[in-house]
Image (spheres, rainbow, N blue to C red):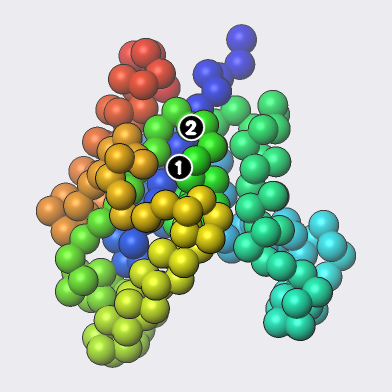
Amino acid sequence: MGAQRMNLFMCGQLGTGCTEIAQIVSSRLDMTVFNTEKLLHHLAADLELSFTQLATKATSGEVELDESLSSLVSSFIRDKHVERLIVEGRTAFMVLLEPATLKVLLVAPEYVRAYHIAQRRDIDYEKAREATRISDEDRAQLVRRLWKVDWLDPSLYDLVINTGAWSYDQAAGIIETALRNRSGAKEV
């Protein structure tokens, strides 16, 4: 008998640790992670394009990246061969209102997020703060355009975690417990 089907949508503000927490949960629960980077690899391969060619086509309007990525991630969610998946980061907002075992929103104070981004990207703190603001605006516009809802509305999610108050390992543990409770299984 195969593994129990499980979909985790992990949305978050930039700098809240979506990628890191998704990797922890993935390694503990044997789940496949999909994010924008991985989906861009799939999209470029599907279109038989290099990343440079894909970027050129996206810039010229020949390829609508958000629509293409949304369609691609939706196909993975529906794929019966992909039984345990995590959709994380900005890409998770593209499927926000699709059915999932668990929908999580990661938040943190701006200073925590900016510090994390500064460390991860090796940039100064003020540039990282600006990156968080730009990302917040982008995600708000994306969700408003796709779903006509406020991306930070907690009622859209099953669980909201402040990663300024919890370590990534602790946040992953909270998510694992919620997945177990949702799936009704002792082990997921």
Q: Please provide percent x and percent y for residue 126.
A: 25, 89
Q: What label does residue 9 carry, if any?
A: 1
Pick the front one: 22 or 111: 111
Distance between the alpha carbons at the discs numbered 2 and 1? 7 Å
Q: Is residue 141 left or right of residue 168?
A: right
- Quadrant position of the N terminus in the picture: top right
Q: Are marks 2 and 1 in contact (CB under 8 Å)?
A: yes
Quadrant in which residue 179 is drawn = top left
Residue at the far left: name it.
165
Q: Categorize mark 1 by other alpha carbons within 10 Å: few (<14), some (14-19), many (20+).
A: many
Question: Could you say whether the residue bearing mark 2 is in a helix, strand or loop?
Answer: loop
For image coordinates 21% across by 60% down, the residue present is 108
Residue 83 visible in the snapshot: yes
Residue 119 visible in the snapshot: no
Quadrant in which residue 173 is drawn = top left
For image coordinates 53% across by 60% down, the residue present is 145
Q: Please provide percent x and percent y for residue 4.
A: 53, 19
Quadrant in which residue 54 is drawn = bottom right
For image coordinates 70% across by 41% down, the residue present is 75
Pick the front one: 126 or 3: 126
Q: Please provide percent x and percent y for residue 118.
A: 30, 80
Relative to 76, say whether 125 is above or below: below
Q: Please provide percent x and percent y for residue 73.
A: 63, 47
Q: Amino acid at mark 1?
A: Phe
For image coordinates 45% across by 71% down, the residue present is 138
Relative to 34, say whether 36 is above or below: below
Question: Could you say whether the residue bearing mark 1 is in a helix, strand or loop?
Answer: strand
Q: Amino acid at mark 2?
A: Ala
Q: Which residue is mark 2?
A: 100
Residue at the far front: name it.
148
Q: Is residue 182 left or right of residue 26?
A: left
